[in-house]
Image (cartoon, rainbow, N blue to C red):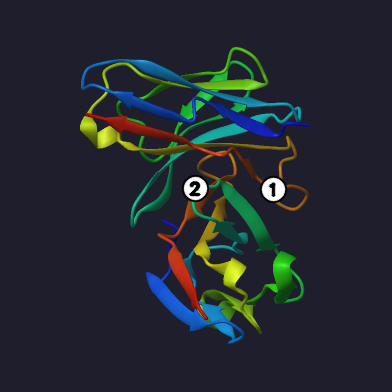
Amino acid sequence: AQSVTQPDIHITVSEGASLELRCNYSYGATPYLFWYVQSPGQGLQLLLKYFSGDTLVQGIKGFEAEFKRSQSSFNLRKPSVHWSDAAEYFCAVGDKVRSGYALNFGKGTSLLVTP
Amino acid sequence: NAGVTQTPKFRVLKTGQSMTLLCAQDMNHEYMYWYRQDPGMGLRLIHYSVGEGTTAKGEVPDGYNVSRLKKQNFLLGLESAAPSQTSVYFCASRFPSGSFLADTQYFGPGTRLTVL
């Protein structure tokens, strides 16, 4: 069965520092991968998605993610973090076969940004 | 467009009570979903619908029922609420295309439910 693992439950970075959030997936075929962000008390907003082609994907708010098939990873990066980036980040894989293109989410990584 | 809206935003129930959560979308989406979010668990799929009049079970369907009588609405029912159903519930919808390529899921703001 497909699954998504986000190894880091919490991450703390200083404002202006670079950021990398890890995501590993388990999926038999070409995965459909997503990163969502959830600000406190809010719904989920799509940052970026990957289906095929160029393995480096650009998203909103200055985020990018790189798909590495050999490592089964889809890590999210940002070169310089802003205080407003503090939020919960979810990696997800799309489930085409089992459940109407529903998303299978990782458990999330909580990002804290310090001054 | 309002996008995806959820009613109510907050609710407190006593064990054994029933309630219905309403999800509405004005984007003419065929597919709709109900997820629950629990601390440290991410979001898990409860039920989903691929069109008006159709529903199917997701990963954690026990204790919930759903209905999709109108294309724009997807209702989630709890017949006899239990403390284990304390959670934040998110509804989502997507375009009808049979592919992830052309679309994405749009999420509602969530309903925070507490069962005492």
Q: Position of residue A108 (x, y in %)?
A: 44, 62
Q: Residue at x 73, y 26 (%)?
A: B26
- Identify the element where label 1 is drawn: loop
User: Which residue has dot 1 on it?
Assistant: B104
Q: Position of residue B17 (x, y in %)?
A: 27, 15
Q: Is residue B26 left or right of residue A100?
A: right
User: Would you say the residues marked 2 and 1 are in contact, meaning their CB atoms lie under 8 Å apart?
Assistant: no
Q: Residue at x 49, y 30 (%)?
A: B9
Label 2 chain ID? A
Q: Quadrant of residue A79?
A: bottom right
Neighbour tally class for label 1: few under 14, some 14-19, many 20 plus, Cα within 10 Å = some
Q: Nearer the viewer, residue B95 or B35?
A: B35
Residue flagged by tag 2: what amino acid is it? Gly
Residue farthest to the top, as pictured: B69
Q: Position of residue B94 (x, y in %)?
A: 68, 38
Q: Indicate whether B51 appears above or below B58.
A: above
**How much space separates mark 2 and mark 1, taking CA atoms?**
21 Å
Neighbour tally class for label 2: few under 14, some 14-19, many 20 plus, Cα within 10 Å = few
Q: Nearer the viewer, mark 2 or mark 1?
A: 2
Q: Quadrant of residue B64?
A: top left
| Residue B57 tag number | none
Q: Nearer the viewer, residue A62 or B76?
A: A62
Residue flagged by tag 1: what amino acid is it? Thr
Q: Is residue A59 visible?
A: no
Q: Indicate whether A91 appears above or below A79.
A: above
Q: Position of residue B62 (x, y in %)?
A: 31, 29
Q: Is residue A15 left or right of residue B9?
A: right
User: Which residue has dot 2 on it?
Assistant: A41
Q: Nearer the viewer, residue B105 or A18?
A: A18
Residue farthest to the front, as pictured: A115
Q: Are marks 2 and 1 on the same chain?
A: no
